[in-house]
Amino acid sequence: MKLPSPRGPLSRAVTEVLSSPVGGEVGDLAPLTRRALEHSVDLLADDDVQLTLYVMYELFYRGFEGVDDDWEWSPDLLAARRLIELALEQHLSDRVAVPEGVAPARAAVAEALFALTAPTPGPSVARYVAKRATLEQVRELLVQRSVYQLKEADPHTWAIPRLVGRPKAALVEIQADEYGGGDPERMHCELFARTMRGAALDAEYGAYIEQIPAVTLAGVNVMSLFGLHRRWRGATAGHLAAFEMTSSLPNRLYGDGFRRHGFGQDTTEYFDEHVEADAVHEQIAGRDLAGALVQQEPELLHDVLFGAATCLYLDEVVGEHLLSAWGAGVSSLRTA
Ligand SMILES: [Fe+2]
Ligand SMILES: [Fe+2]
């Protein structure tokens, strides 16, 4: 993908650095980063900060056209990234409520995760999509989700070498499914690309980055934050468990929304696949990944629950953004 356009002074400085050859003058990004963080009113909705972090993380996935691969491990970029990560971790731990009184045992953790992720009656994007969303809004949903779904599973895969025994086997089992079990056509990112093409959208990785708002980037950034740090392996396991546990039902509703607009099975297959697959994945993720990890390393209990609760929190923030935009009759995407 191409380097996105800057959204403020920090992302401008970082994209300028990345456009130059490695070894050139970077300048001290730390003061600029501190200033951006100090001036940030709502970190999750801060376009300049979230885009900067997204760009820094993308160097660890597929990189950018014309950007030297060697920037990935630049100490200057990593130092600035660390400042953003610390602020983001603080922002989340101040706001995310973690369940208390859970025993550090496999079954108790799984049970706590299922309780935490149980469906709630309030407004939901999935129900809105099933019943009311316009054609334009269901297509917009795909654009919003493309920023993660076109690299579906990748952020959690970082945790594999950091686990051993049952949790590792469980994560590999889930991810093997996400990656199509050896069939590139069955990879979930490819199924999603087909859904996008079916809705006459560009399925090229990063095609819509300019239109993706900060809150959506924040959701993906948090997955990368957890995935790229070994110390957050518990949060990755909890995040994935919550993600799988809140997937099956909404995906049926998303599929209904697309069927309501006349789309066929080629377009809804991504959603249909997740109704089935994630009913299995949630069991593996709850018991054999998250539960068994806490059984192995009881000190990770808080992180596992924090990861799960963070997943739900971010889902809620993004959901509110979508529903309030759509309720007001405007697009949830960024306009130039
Ligand atoms: Fe999937
Ligand atoms: Fe899944």
Image (cartoon, rainbow, N blue to C red):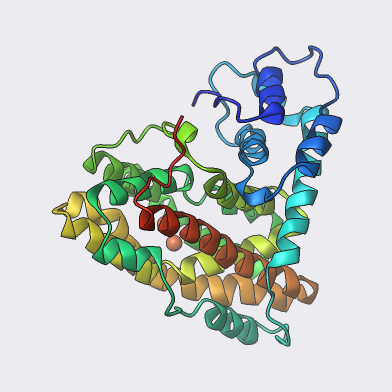
Q: Quick check: which quadrant has ligand 2?
A: bottom left
Compared across the picture, whether 313 is left or right of 87 comes to: left
Look at the image and tell me whether residue 272 can be seen: no
Depicted 159 relative to depicted 165: above or below: above
For the point 38% across and 43% down, which residue is it? 143
State the image coordinates of residue 196 (x, y, percent, origin top left): 30, 42
For the point 36% across and 67% down, which residue is it? 250
Compared across the picture, whether 26 is left or right of 264 comes to: right
Please identify the quarter of the rendering in which residue 90 is found. bottom right
Q: Nearer the viewer, residue 174 or 334?
A: 334
Q: Nearer the viewer, residue 164 or 292?
A: 292
For the point 23% across and 49% down, which residue is it? 135
Please identify the quarter of the rendering in which residue 121 is found. bottom left
State the image coordinates of residue 48 (x, y, percent, origin top left): 65, 36
Compared across the picture, whether 90 is left or right of 317 comes to: right
Compared across the picture, whether 157 is left or right of 81 comes to: left
Q: Nearer the viewer, residue 149 or 70?
A: 149
Look at the image and tell me whether residue 274 can be seen: yes
State the image coordinates of residue 259 (x, y, percent, origin top left): 18, 59
Total marks in image: 0
For the point 69% across and 13% down, which residue is it? 20
Depicted 320 relative to depicted 149: above or below: below
State the image coordinates of residue 112 (x, y, percent, origin top left): 60, 83
Q: Nearer the viewer, residue 178 or 8?
A: 8
